[in-house]
Amino acid sequence: MGRLREALRGRLRSAREIYEGMYVAPYRAEIHREYLRQRDLFLLAGFSDLLGVPNPTQFYLLELYPELIESFHEWHLRMGMETAPEGGFRCC
Amino acid sequence: MLSRRLLFFGGKGGVGKTTLASATALTLADQRFRTLLVSTDPAHSTSDILRADLGPEPRHVVADCWAMELDPEREADRYIADVKGRIAESVAPRLVAEVERQIDIARASPGATEAALFERFTRVLEEEGREFDRVVFDTAPTGQTLQLLSLPEQMSAWITGLIGRRRKLTAAGRMWRNVAGAAAEEAASSDDPVLHALEERRARFLRARGVLMDAGQTAFVFVVLPERLPIWETERAVQALGKHGIPVAGILVNQVLPDDLSGDFVDRRKAREAVYLAQIQEQLGSWPLWRVPLREEDPVGTDALRKLGCSIWDAYGMLPKAPYETNGGGTESSG
């Protein structure tokens, strides 16, 4: 009896996961996109000088460069550039 | 006016800011206020006029007077060294060289020295200056000084925008972590060092702004000559400071021809001068105007400057009382 119940419960769980997956996956992807969008926007707003757009606070944000260089690295990989584009950080 | 802790002397180049700022600082020191004279003008002349060897740190001049001349280039180098030191531990070793290279590029950018000068300026306002009863700033000519004084307002607005962005990013990261769980490790955590650093920056700008706008501790004095161009420039500067909420205490009208002179040449000069004095009265008369008579000799050296300062402020009954004699208590020694 115990084994049957266990098996039944397992099936039910996978059914629920499939059902959730169908509904949640697009939503999940959208949330991920939104997160990446916000990440890029912050990179642009805070460190536009890397793209040649003057940034009045550049000099006050130098201490954020270590954090930034990681974001920048992640960004250029995601944008399909295997190596860092000219002009910005030469992280790879 | 002289009861404010922070006194700024400003005006067009060549009107006598350095002379009058030094004279006032020495007068305050003479009244036993521990006084620091700070020159923020990159083209320093304070050491020349005091006949003292000054540097970027306070040096003792005479009695209760100390003085220093800020050097923007040196401040920029120092700031860069400081940033490199601070981030050394938080950078992945493979990236250290690259981060340092980027910081060196920023050092060469046009805003760098200005920003570094401001950085030091806020430290004088908030920390170094606290060791003194009075800090007298001999500022650079009008344009540079307005820029320096309006920086906190502009920068805090910009950084506020960045903080908003960063908060949105943190919120989006939190949502992403909620739905993705362990897959979203890279999402910024709620304890965000970037947000923290931004907020600290902004707090610093706002504090500097608060001090500059506080009429209880700050006074701006303009120096003007009875001549056409300085009058117009001063009027614009006074209005600009008003717009930034920085309190203007009054205007020193320098090099006014003394009453007891006569002769054809002097009379003609005086007639010209009267026109400009009337113009000053009309354009700047809503602030207290203090006249400083033209002298036979240039006041150079601490003695001459101290005498000049005493005579100016005494003439208007504004000589402050010595702090440690009138207050009586505390650290006072019977002298």
Image (cartoon, coloured by chain):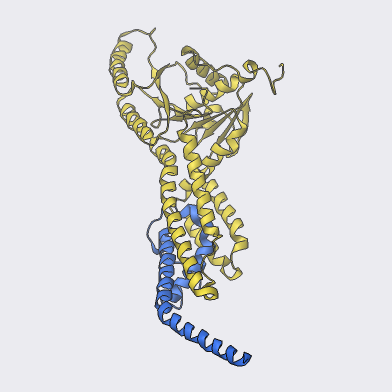
Chain colours: A blue, B yellow
Place residue B90 in its image quadrant. bottom right
Q: Nearer the viewer, residue A75 or B302?
A: A75
* B272 horizontally vs B168: left or right: left
Is B27 placed above or below B11 here? above
Counting the numbered discs, the total is: 0
Give x and y (percent) for residue B28: 56, 22
Query: Is residue B42 visible to us here?
Result: no
**Which residue occupies the extreme right position in the image?**
B334
Query: Is residue A23 visible to us here?
Result: yes
* B161 horizontally vs B263: left or right: right
Give x and y (percent) for residue A1: 62, 92
**Residue at horizontal 57 percent and vertical 91 percent from the top:** A7
Is B123 placed above or below B18 here? below
Place residue B88 in its image quadrant. bottom right
Place residue B276 in its image quadrant. top left
Give x and y (percent) for residue B126: 56, 38
**Which residue occupies the extreme front position in the image?**
A1
Is B80 placed above or below A81 here? above
**Residue at horizontal 59 percent and vertical 68 percent from the top:** B92
Q: Nearer the viewer, residue B6 or B293?
A: B6
Give x and y (percent) for residue B204: 52, 45
Is B88 placed above or below B49 here? below
